[in-house]
Image (spheres, rainbow, N blue to C red):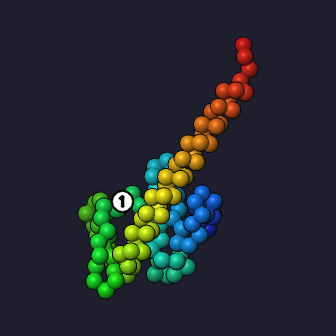
Amino acid sequence: MTSRGRQEGTKNVCGITHKSPISIDHSSGMYFFPTSSPQNPNCSWISHSHIDQINRAPDHCTTIIFKNGRTVTLPVSHGSMQNQVQRTAQFRYLLQNRIKYVLKSKHYTDVVAEPFV
């Protein structure tokens, strides 16, 4: 699936249309969000699961500290970065609930569809 298709999936799940987070592999928790418009050549994609902290940095920048101890400072405001982290968390929650519902419904359908012996 293309990143455009994944962004459409995000829109269908939670209505986010701009700077949409995407799921690469929901079963292993691989969710990413863009730091700016994906059309911007300076856009970076951040793994939601690997963030340990986000901190204010000078000049309206944000420093991200990853769980492995590495850091990166990006020219993105702290508020914008917090918003992206929260939107990604909301998307993860809604997608996981939708998947659970579908799997539960499928299981129920499979059980009901089995003939009685």
Q: Position of residue 87 (x, y in %)?
A: 47, 64
Residue 109 against residue 98 in the figure, above or below: above
Tell me which residue sits at (34%, 83%) in the image. 60
Residue in the foreground of this view, choosing between 91 and 75: 91
The quarter of the image holding the C terminus is top right
Secondary structure at numbered mark 1? helix
Q: Position of residue 46 (x, y in %)?
A: 42, 67
Instruction: Name the residue type under label 1.
Output: His
Residue in the foreground of this view, choosing between 104 and 45: 104
- Residue 80, picture quadrant: bottom left
Q: Position of residue 40 (x, y in %)?
A: 51, 81
Tell me which residue sits at (59%, 70%) in the image. 17
Residue at far left of view: 69
Residue in the foreground of this view, choosing between 86 and 70: 86
Q: Is residue 30 left or right of residue 117?
A: left
Q: Which residue is mark 1?
A: 50
Q: Position of residue 64 (x, y in %)?
A: 32, 70
Q: Is residue 8 left or right of residue 63?
A: right
